[in-house]
Image: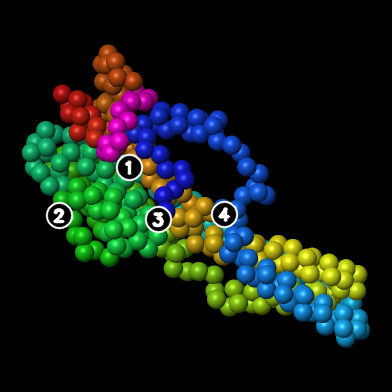
Amino acid sequence: MISQHHHPYHSLRAWHAGQREKRINTRWVPYSLRLEGGGFLRIMPQILLSGVVAALIGIVCQFMGDELSLHSPILFPIFGFVVGLAITFRMQSSYNRWWEGRVQWDKISAVSRSFARTLWIHVPTERKLEDLGGLGHGKQDAIKCVHILAVALKHHLRGERDWDECGNLKQLLATLPNYNFLATNHPLTITMHLASYVERYRTETKVDTQVLTHLLTHIDTFTAIISACERLLRTPIPLGYNIAISRIVWIFVIALPSQLWGEFRWWSIAVTMVTAYALFVLAEVGLEIENPWGAGPNDLDLDRYCNLLALDLNEIVAYPYGSCSEAVGSGTKTPLSLIDVHDVDGEDPFSMFAESEATSMA
């Protein structure tokens, strides 16, 4: 499933322009009238079943007498309060997991930018590194590896192990020297490549110790983020909670028609179905956002995050590295904020890496 926010832009300026145009031209539909993302179709069988149960209870009460119906002004408000607590716990627990996933991906974006900026500006580059081949083939390879890490983590969290499901990842990994395509944890393997890039610069250049420590700390942070994301993926809400909440909701829905029959009569069927919708849809949304790494409308839009990260890294390598005085006072006509990249279908967002570094080294 392709993200609804996926766009083929190759510059931040084009992306923002496209987003503004989309907001202007898109017709707004009220949330109450939207089907996608609401979980209505998935809970439809449960709503219909609750209606059938309410109808059966109504038939029994109609032909057997109203004395069979329940009329308790105290029991049902208390039980309804318990159901509300159960649904609230389910929603809050799931949303906390969803938000934690968003926080972890925000850390990926922040650490990636910081790593790329530090490597691009503060690590000296010697021309002889360009002739070494392998891991020493320029700073742009190391920065591109950061983007590959984000893409690999996206597929890893979605459980996409078949290359047919993540063909773009295979093409990106092919740019890494001597990559082990048989690896089971590609994000972790890519951190090893990042560490190798940093080690090569440590041995081949006069990189400052503080800069080296900064880069290695960022690689450690990448590893910690991968572990945190895997924790959210592999540690769902305990099964016992889900079973208990589901049973509590169903007991309330089944007992509700008998409580309503004395006052609403056959209208109790419709009231029961509406109440069932309210309870089941909250439980369903909580179940869906429990794992924020999917590709549904309620999941985190990892496709858009990866695309924006690629554009951000492209902005960094567009900056002429070296001292700030050289960049500002060199009289260059190249803007330091944004450098347009031609929007060509199929163009690699990193196609300007080599050109940017060659221009800066000249």
Q: Magenta segment, which residues?
A: 336-348
Where is residue 248 drawn, in percent x and y? Answer: 69, 76
Please state if 338 lies on the left or on the right of 71 as rendered: left
Task: List x then y, in percent, for residue 216.
Answer: 29, 49
Q: Given contact means CB atoms under 8 Å apart, are the residues at marks 3 and 2 in contact?
A: no
Q: Is residue 222 left or right of residue 96?
A: left
Image: 328 above or below 308: above
Label 2: few (<14), some or many (≥20) within 10 Å? Answer: few
Residue at (64%, 62%) from the top-left corner?
Answer: 281
**Residue at disc 2, secondary structure:** loop
Disc sitting over residue 245 in the figure: none
Earlier along the polypeptide chain: callout 3 or callout 4?
4
* Mark nearer the N terminus (1 vs 3): 1
Gap between marks 1 and 3 measured at Cα: 14 Å
| Nearer to us in this view, 139 or 99 | 99
Does residue 309 appear in the picture of this structure? no
User: Mark 3 and mark 4: span between their CA atoms?
Assistant: 28 Å
In the picture as drawn, the residue positioned furthest to the top comes out as 331
Q: Position of residue 162 (x, y in %)?
A: 29, 62
Residue 117 vs residue 260, the one in the foreground: 260
From the image, tell me which residue sits under label 3.
225
Q: Nearer the viewer, mark 4 or mark 2?
A: 4
Instruction: Say which of marks 3 and 4 sits in front.
Output: 4
Circle nearer the N terminus (1, 4): 4
Q: Report which quarter residue 26 is drawn in.
A: top right
Q: Which residue is mark 2?
A: 178
* Mark 3 burial class by Cα count in 10 Å: few <14, some 14-19, many 20+: many
Q: Secondary structure at mark 4?
A: loop
> Is tag 3's residue or tag 2's residue first in the polypeptide sequence?
2
